[in-house]
Amino acid sequence: MSSQTKVRLAPPALWAVILPAIVWLLSACSSVAPVAHVRGTGDLGVVIERADGRVKVIETSGRSVLATVDGLGDLSHASVVFSRDARYAFVFGRDGGLTKVDLLEAKIVGRVLQAGNSIGGSISHDGRIVVAQNYAPGGVKAFDANTLELLAEVPAITEDGRRSKVVGLADLSGRRFIYSLFEAGEIWITDFSDPTNPQTQRFAGGNQPYDALVTPDGRHYIAGLFGEDGLARLDLWNPEQGSRKILSGYGKGQEPLPVYKMPHLRGWSVAGGRAYLPAIGRHEVLVVDTDTWQEVGRIPVRSQPVFAMARPDGREIWVNFAFPDNGWVQVIDTVSGKVTHTLQPGRGILHMEFLSKGYEVWMSARDDNKVVIYDTATKQQIGGFESASPSGIFFTTRAARTGF
């Protein structure tokens, strides 16, 4: 191009279009795309708000509420299990509702009304099958954990054709689940390896099993008995030996007290080779040697215990109580075997949940509409928040534990 060549500029009208486009393109190239907020699910949990059919999604590092999720039905007796990746909470309601909640997006992603009256459930070790235990109709139902599609139903029917309420459901290895039949007095193990053809083993279970648990090592299944003093124990390494009665007649010769609320065996404790469990109709925590399964002591407590829960290191047992003393909590030292602290965290302490390493315990104070948080070392309140009639508190660390 010679120096004499004239440069022809675009008309002003065209520049009015081109310039804004150039500016937008340059700004788009130079700006950094916004980073989506990420969060680890291991820090999360849920609090049941029983009166309103909803849950609060909480995070434990900041001791705060992230969101509230509505529409979960009757949560007057509710329990929760978590997916293996701890992203999803499966909430079992009293009305038979099974609700899948996405904790990261704080929303319901699936819900089925699977029974008329239900009190809990469990999830398989591989996280693929969710099982609900039902009062009405009695039995268990297995669902696909991804879709909540019904896979199988096992009615709890006795030899005379009557259905039994199912209690004490817990997960075992290999897509197996163990549970008790209240009216039938039996313990069943159902294998859902082939969900279209579940296989069930039956064992005698004592008079009216009302709740049960699997020990932390996964070896023993213990069922509490409402119809007699004692518990039924099934050795899961040697199930062919059948169930054995333990603690037979622990209240023999004593007048039982009125039972205002049944103890929760799922909240009992194994620490230092001993088990600590609430005694029905007693103001006592029973101490049992887990080698012999014989009673080795009793610890007097303020009232009828509901939960006797071990701090994760096993050094302490925290105990809450039935009405009318449900505003109290006592702490037992497992070395001395004595009560060391008596606390009043609030009115209507229904549930306690330890952080996985035990330095905090969260407690629901239903009648104060609060969750209170205590430092387990100082026994002082260090946090809390408002919550409408809170009951169960469940942290996602349960996803890695058998029986929870």
Image (cartoon, rainbow, N blue to C red):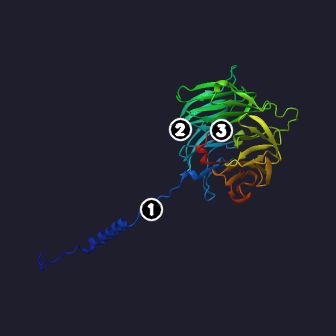
Point out the frontmost of discs 3 and 2: 2
Mark 3 closeness class: few <14, some 14–19, many ≥20 residues within 10 Å: many
Q: For the residue marked with disc 2, what is the amino acid?
A: Asp
* Residue named by callout 2: 126
Vertical order, 383 against 42 (above or below): below
Q: Which mark is residue 34?
A: 1
Q: For the residue marked with disc 1, what is the amino acid?
A: Pro
Give the alpha-carbon distance from disc 2 to disc 1, as whole Å. Answer: 36 Å
Measuring from the top left, give residue 339's x and y in whole percent.
Answer: 80, 50
Is residue 137 something that shows in the picture?
no
Measuring from the top left, give residue 239's x and y in whole percent.
Answer: 64, 27
Task: List the single residue furthest toward the top.
Answer: 160
Measuring from the top left, give residue 160's x and y in whole percent.
Answer: 70, 19
Residue nearest the viewer, comparing 358 with 361: 358
Give the alpha-carbon distance from disc 3 to disc 2, as whole Å. Answer: 19 Å
Image point 63% across, 38% down: which residue? Answer: 217
